Structures are given as structure tokens and as C-alpha cells.
Image: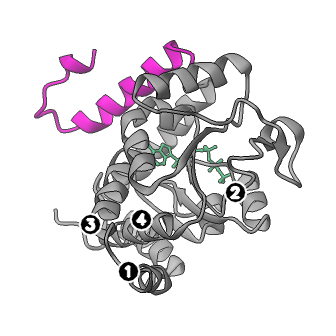
């Protein structure tokens, strides 16, 4: 299906993304709610100009520095992230020394297994989330389940497309959260230490690229990048772009 879309089609990337989500649903990786999430994301991305705006690039650099500074970074993977960027997530995990953990809002054993298998088929040596032997305090049973030696133990967690409640609960546990979400008004990026207002398709490879270029940086330099990042400003600039088109070329 994807190969039928001409590469010069004005909505090429958006259509490819949509097809990947459809294929994710067919493969039992993405939930039906994931289709709705995709639709919401597409609308915001359209208004952002379907590009990484400068403040999102800053956030992606800060995210890379934060992941490199972490003792135990974990990349949380849901059904949309697994359908859209499986290989890119494996590459980022490898670059910053992070664990990958499947963590679903609509958790079923079949979907957990399908996502873990999908990540492994894309090169992940180990995937966490299936043990689910700990809980995030303050949220209801199924959504709270995490691995004791994964998200529960992590100091820095990257959560793409997270729901607001769980993002708040993770922040209350003292985790440093990096949230990728196209909606700057959503609660999850507003809870994050580092909100990345960008499409996960562009964000993950760009965080990896920044991490590679910072690999030999001193801790001081990484700490300064994180300290200089202004979350409020990043949220504000994304909202400005969406509401007014400020800074857009055409
Ligand atoms: P909250 O509880 O945080 O307010 P919500 O109800 O707004 O969440 P959902 O509809 O559950 O959010 O989740 C979808 C979110 O994921 C939306 O904010 C949407 O913009 C975002 N999203 C969807 N696709 C992508 C994508 N490819 N990259 C980044 N973000 C995306």
C-alpha cells in the first residue's frame, strides 16, 4: 500500500504514517484507540508545517543530553510508537544505553507479546515490560504495571504519546520525563521536564543524531545543555506556530 503513494505527493509522509498505523492495527500491535490518537496527531502536525520546528530541535538535543547523563534510562514503547518507529527506537536505545520497555494504556498479553516480538524482529536484544512485577503508585491497576528492573527503577524515562495521568504519576515518582507529543496543550508534555513537540517519526532519529554528536561531550557540557533548555518556552513556541503559523516559510 505504502509503495503506491507517489513520493512527490504533497501529503506523502502523512499517508505513509497513516498506513503504518493501519498495518500496526492489522498486526495486533496498535489498538483501535491508537488510530484516533494518530488522527489527532496528524491535525497538529499539519498545523506545525510537518517539520521539526527550531524549539523542538532544541528539545531533542536536550533529550539526547539528558539520556546520556542518565544512570538508567528507559524508552517506553506503546502500540503507536512500535508501529511507527521500531528500528529507530532500537537504534536510540543502543546509542544512549537505554532499556526498551513495552508499556500500554490498553494492556493485553497478546498485544504486549506482539510488540515485544516486533521490536526484537527489528534488532532489540532484550525487551522489558512482560514481567510487570511493580506498579506506578497512584493510578489504577492495569495502566500502572511496569517492570521492577525497568521503568520502576529508571531515573530518566522517554514516553512517546503518553496519557496525562500516567505522565503525572511518573513525574511524582521523581522520574525525569521526556515526552514526545504533537499537542503542546496536552497534559503529558506539560508535565514533562523535556517536552518534545514533534512527530515521533522525526523526533526519535533526531534525538539519536544529537546523541551521536554529543557522545564524547563532558558531563559539564551535557548538564549545561539540559539546564539551558526552557520547557515553558518550547511549549509556547509550538503553540504559537500552531495558532499563528509564526516562523513558517510558506
Ligand atoms: P492527555 O491525557 O495527555 O490530554 P490526550 O487525550 O490529548 O492526552 P490521546 O488522544 O490519548 O491524547 O493521545 C494522542 C496524543 O498523541 C495526542 O496528543 C496526539 O497529538 C499525539 N500523537 C499522535 N500521533 C503522534 C505522533 N506520530 N507523534 C507525536 N505525537 C503524536
Figure check: 96 above or below 57: above
SS for callout 3: helix
Is 113 covered by the magenta stretch? Answer: no
Instruction: Work out whether mark 4 precedes mark 2 in sequence or the reverse, and give the earlier one.
Output: 4
**Quadrant where the N terminus is found in the figure:** top left
The reply to whether discs 2 and 3 touch (Cβ–Cβ < 8 Å) is no
The quarter of the displayed image where residue 175 is located: bottom right
Q: Position of residue 159 (x, y in %)?
A: 58, 52
Q: Which residue is mark 2?
A: 167
Q: Is ligand 1 within 8 Å of the beta carbon of the residue shown at mark 2?
A: yes
Tag nearer the camera, 4 or 1? 1
Mark 4 CB near ligand 1 (8 Å cut) = no
Residue drawn at x 81%, y 44% is 144
On residue 218, the disc is 1
Instruction: Give, as a single range, the part of the protein colored magenta.
Output: 1-30
Q: Is residue 69 visible?
A: yes
- How many neighbours does mark 4 have within 10 angstroms: few (below 14), some (14-19), or many (20 or more)? many
Relative to 13, 188 lies left or right: right
Residue wearing tag 4: 64
Q: Quadrant of the C terminus?
A: bottom left
Helix, strand or loop for disc 2: helix
User: Which residue is labeled 3 in the image?
Assistant: 213
Disc sitting over residue 46 in the figure: none
Q: Which secondary structure lies at badge 1?
A: loop
Magenta segment includes 17: yes
Q: Nearer the viewer, residue 117 or 19?
A: 117
In this image, 178 relative to 107: left or right?
Answer: left
> Between disc 2 and disc 3, whose residue precedes?
2
Whether 229 is drawn above or below 239: the answer is below
Tell me where residue 185 appears, x and y as whole percent: 58, 63
Compare marks 4 and 1 and give the one earlier in the sequence: 4
Amino acid at each position: 500500500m505504502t509503495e503506491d503513494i507517489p513520493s512527490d505527493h504533497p501529503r506523502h509522509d502523512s499517508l505513509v504514517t497513516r498506513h503504518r498505523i493501519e498495518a500496526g492495527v492489522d498486526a495486533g500491535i496498535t489498538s483501535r484507540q491508537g488510530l484516533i490518537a494518530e488522527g489527532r496527531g496528524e491535525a497538529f502536525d499539519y498545523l506545525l508545517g510537518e517539520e521539526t520546528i527550531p524549539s523542538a530541535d532544541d528539545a531533542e538535543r536536550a533529550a539526547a543530553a539528558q539520556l546520556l547523563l542518565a544512570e538508567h534510562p528507559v524508552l517506553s514503547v506503546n502500540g503507536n510508537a512500535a508501529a511507527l518507529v521500531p528500528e529507530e527506537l532500537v537504534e536510540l536505545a543502543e546509542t544512549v544505553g537505554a532499556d526498551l520497555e513495552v508499556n500500554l494504556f490498553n494492556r493485553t498479553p497478546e498485544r504486549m507479546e506482539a510488540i515485544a516480538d516486533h521490536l526484537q524482529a527489528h534488532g532489540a536484544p532484550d525487551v522489558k515490560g512482560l514481567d510487570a512485577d511493580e506498579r506506578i503508585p497512584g493510578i489504577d491497576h492495569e495502566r500502572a504495571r511496569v517492570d521492577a528492573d525497568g521503568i520502576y527503577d529508571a531515573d530518566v524515562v522517554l514516553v512517546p504519546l503518553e496519557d496525562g495521568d500516567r505522565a503525572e504519576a511518573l513525574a511524582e515518582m521523581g522520574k525525569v520525563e521526556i515526552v514526545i507529543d504533537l499537542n503542546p496543550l496536552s497534559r503529558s508534555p506539560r508535565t514533562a521536564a523535556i517536552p518534545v513537540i514533534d512527530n515521533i517519526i522525526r523526533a526519535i532519529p533526531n534525538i539519536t543524531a544529537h546523541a551521536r554528536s554529543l557522545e564524547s561531550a563532558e558531563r559539564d557540557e551535557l548538564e549545561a545543555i539540559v539546564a539551558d533548555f526552557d520547557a515553558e518556552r518550547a511549549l509556547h513556541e509550538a503553540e504559537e506556530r500552531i495558532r499563528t503559523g509564526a516562523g513558517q516559510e510558506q
